[in-house]
Image (cartoon, grey):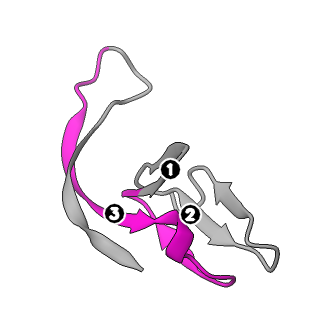
Amino acid sequence: MRAGSRRVFYETDDPGQAGQWLQAQIYRREQLLAGNVIRGPAVIEEISATNVLYPGDVARVDRFASMLVDVGAAR
């Protein structure tokens, strides 16, 4: 399921705050199965899109293979 990791730059919501480089897990979307849960920081790559999960974001794959993302769920 995991395809490795790499450093990713994460911006902040506040323009007065500097962003930061974080080590993010990389996932291949086609390998995710129902019930998988991914916590940010992470990047989920597929042929037509790239989903970037910030720290605190949580993605879940439902029984229909849809990916549902709770933004800031773990904050």
- Point 70% across, 60% down: residue: 68
Q: Earlier in the sequence, mark 2 or mark 3?
A: 3
Frontmost residue, 52 versus 65: 65
Q: CA distance from mark 1 to mark 3?
A: 14 Å
Q: Position of residue 22 (x, y in %)?
A: 21, 51
Viewer-side label of 1, 3: 1
Q: CA distance from mark 2 to mark 1?
A: 21 Å
The label shown at residue 26 is 3
- Point 56% across, 51% down: residue: 72
Q: Is residue 43 left or right of residue 47?
A: left
Q: Which residue is mark 2?
A: 58
Q: Is residue 1 left or right of residue 8?
A: right
- Point 43% across, 49% down: residue: 54
Amino acid, disc 3 = Ile
Amino acid, disc 2 = Val
Q: Which residue is mark 1?
A: 47
